[in-house]
Amino acid sequence: MAEFRDMLGGKINYEIPEGKTVQAFLHGLAQADAAFGKAVFDPEDQIRPHVNILKNGKHIGFLGSSEMMLADGDVITIFSYAAGG
């Protein structure tokens, strides 16, 4: 699978309007690139288990949920688990 950055054309910095949730931000990226959307969201519109989303370096699962609001200066990191031997 291509890296998420490659799916989004190499762009790594996005301006996010204040008051958006992590989920809304991810949906915005998914609208920009269908492959990204399929890689991140399952058919029930849930974040796939192998996709890690961090807000300011902390996994969103530990912070509450993907419905948390974003604020000025927040950093969102998206990556998938690496596996292999």
Image (cartoon, helix red, strand yellow):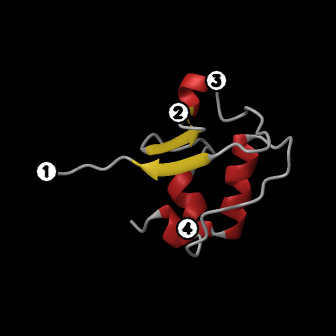
Residue beneath the point at 54% across and 42% down? 53
Give the amino acid type for the residue marked by disc 4 in the picture: Ala
Decide which of tag 4 and tag 2 comes sooner along the chain. Answer: 4
Tag in front: 3 or 4: 3
Residue beneath the point at 55% across and 48% down? 77
Question: Does residue 82 sit above or below 55 in this rendering?
Answer: below
Q: Is residue 72 visible?
A: yes
Tag in front: 1 or 4: 1
What x and y, as percent, mark residue 74?
70, 42
Residue at which label 2 appears: 59
Q: Is residue 42 visible?
A: no
* Numbered label attached to residue 19: none
Give the amino acid type for the residue marked by disc 3 in the picture: Gly
Badge 1 element = loop
**What distance separates the C-alpha of mark 1 from that of mark 2?**
25 Å
Decide which of tag 1 and tag 2 comes sooner along the chain. Answer: 2
**What distance separates the C-alpha of mark 3 from that of mark 1?**
32 Å
Tag in front: 1 or 2: 2
* Numbered label attached to residue 85: 1
Decide which of tag 3 and tag 4 comes sooner along the chain. Answer: 4
Dot 4, how many residues are within 10 Å of its Cα: few (below 14), some (14-19), or many (20+)? some
Give the amino acid type for the residue marked by disc 2 in the picture: His
Residue at which label 3 appears: 64
Dot 2, how many residues are within 10 Å of its Cα: few (below 14), some (14-19), or many (20+)? some
Q: Quadrant of the N terminus?
A: bottom left
What x and y, as percent, mark residue 61?
55, 28
What x and y, as percent, mark residue 40?
54, 52
Locate residue 9: give its quadrant: bottom right
Residue placed most toward the observer, 46 or 17? 17
* Numbered label attached to residue 35: 4
